[in-house]
Image (tube, rainbow, N blue to C red):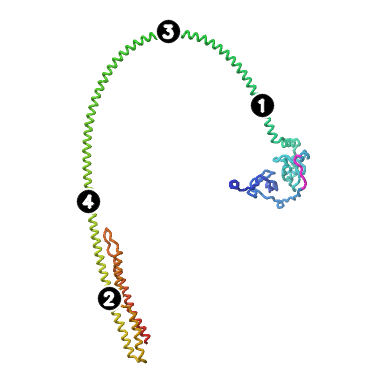
Amino acid sequence: MDQIFESHFGGNQNSNNGGETEAYCPKCRADTQHIILESYGEEVRRVQCAVCGDMHSFKPPRGGDDDNPEPLVSKRRGQKKLDWLDGINTYDHGTAIRYSPKAAVSVGQIVVHPTFGVGFVSEVAGEQKVEVMFRGNLPRVLVHGRGEDDDERRGEPVSPDEVRQLLGLEMGPSPEEIAAERERKLAEEEAEKARMAEEKRQAAERERLAAQERREADRARRESEREAKRKERDDERDRKKREREEERVRKADERRLEQERKRLEASSKREEERARKDAEREEKRVAVEREKDRAKKEREKEREKDKLAKQREKDKLGKQREKEKLAKQREKDKVTQQREKDKVAKQREKDKASKQREKDKASKQREKDKASKQREKDKAKKSAAPKKAAGKKSAAPTKSGAKKPAAKKPAAKAAAKRPSPKKSGAKAAGKSRAASSANKKRAPAPKKGGAKKPSASGKKVGGKKAGAGKASVSARAKAPAKRSGTDKRTRG
C-alpha cells in the first residue's frame, strides 16, 4: 500500500530499494549483508539476506548487544585490496571449499558461493565474519565458522577442475562478444540458406525447362491427333447436317400443316368462347344494373332514416336546451331571491345594530347624568365641610385675630384647583361619541349567508368608559377633601 501511495503521489523520491545494508538475520543468527527490498524514505522495512536468501522484516544489527558478541577487527582502510582476477590467479585452487555459514574459511582461500559465484577471502571482518571478493570486485561480508563440530567447520571441498569450469563460465566472453558471435552465426546461417535457396531455384529452373520441353512435344503430338479427329468430326458433322436439313424440311412441312389445322380449330373455339363470354358479360351487366338499382333504393331508405334520426336528434337537443334554459332561469331566480333575503337580513342587522347603539348611547347618557349628580353631591359636601370648620374655629379661643383670613387662603386655592364637573362630562361625552363612530367604521360587513349577531362589545366598552368616568369623577371629588384635610392640619 505504501509503494502504491509513493508511486502515485511522488513519495519516496530517495528510495534505497536494491541497495545493501547490514542487518540481523534470524536464520543465520548473525549480522549479515542484506539487500533492501522495501523502504519508505530513510526507513528500511523489508530486506533479503545475501548469505542464506531469507526475506524478512528489517532488524537492526545487534553488534555488541548480541548474545555472543563478536570482537570487531579494525579495517585496514589504507591497504589496497587485490582485484578479483588477480586474487583468483594468485591463490591456490586446491583449498577451495563450497560456502556454508557452518564452514570456516581463512584469508586467501577460494570460496564457491551458490549465488555470487567464485570468490576469495580478502580479509577477516570479525570473529565469525569474513569479507569475500567476487567477480566485478564486489565485496560481500559473510558469516563462517558456525558449525558445531570439526566436520561442519571443515566444509565441503571443491575440486580444482570444478573451480576452473566455474571460472570458465564466469570468465567467458562478454555480452557484446556473445552478441557479435550470435550475429556472425546468424549471418552465416542466412548466407547458407541463401546459397541453398539459389541451388534449389536453379534446379527448379532446370526442371521447369525440361518439363516445358516435354509439354511442347506432348502438345504437338496432341495437336496433330486433334487435327485428325477434327477433320473426322467435320466430315461427320457435314453428313449429319445434310440429314438434319432434310429432316427439318420434312418436319417443317408436317408442322405447317398441323399448325394450319390447329389454327382453324383454335379460331372456331375462340369464336365460340367470345360468344359465350359476351353472353356472360351481358348477364353480369344486367345483374350489376339490378344491384345498382337495389343499392340506390337502399341508400335512399338510409338517407330517409338518417334524415328522420337527425330531425329527432335536433328536436331532442332543442328540448334539452329549453330544459337547460328553464333550469338556468330557475337558478337565476333562486340567486335573486337569496340576494333579496340577504339584503333584508343585512337591513335587519343594521337596524338591530342601530338600536343597540341607541341603547348604548342612552346607557352612557344615564351614566353621565348619574356621574354629574354624584359630582353635585360631592361638591355640596365639600362646600359644607369648610363652613363646619369655620364654626369650630370661631368657638375655640384665639390668640390673635389676624390668623382667620390666613386660613381661608388654602381653601380658595383648593377651590381654584378643583376640576369643573361640566368640562369632564363634556370630555367623556366626546370620547364616547368618538368610540361609537370608530365602532361603526370597524364593524365588519355582513356576509351573504346571513348577518352575524351584534356583539355586546359596545355595552362593555360603554360600561368601561362609564366606569372610568365615574372613577375619575370620584377621584376628583375626593381630591378637595384631602386638600381640605391638609388645610385643617395647617390651621391646627
Q: Position of residue 446 (x, y in %)?
A: 28, 61
Which amino acid type is marked by label 2? Lys
Task: Tell me if label 1 and label 3 are in contact, CB under 8 Å.
Answer: no
Q: Considering depth in this image, is 94 or 295 the residue closer to the camera?
A: 295
**Res. 81 in view:** yes
First of labels 4, 2 by sequence position: 4
Question: Magenta residues, as a range?
Answer: 78-85
Left or right position of 233 against 286:
right
Task: Please give the residue where the numbered disc 4 appears in the rendered image.
Answer: 329
First of labels 3, 2 by sequence position: 3
Q: Position of residue 451 (x, y in %)?
A: 27, 61
Q: Considering depth in this image, is 374 or 28 the residue closer to the camera?
A: 374
Which amino acid type is marked by label 3? Glu
First of labels 4, 1 by sequence position: 1
Task: Please give the residue where the numbered disc 3 appears in the rendered image.
Answer: 243
First of labels 1, 3 by sequence position: 1
Which residue: 43% across, 7% down?
A: 242
Q: Position of residue 270 (x, y in %)?
A: 29, 17
Q: Secondary structure at mark 2?
A: helix
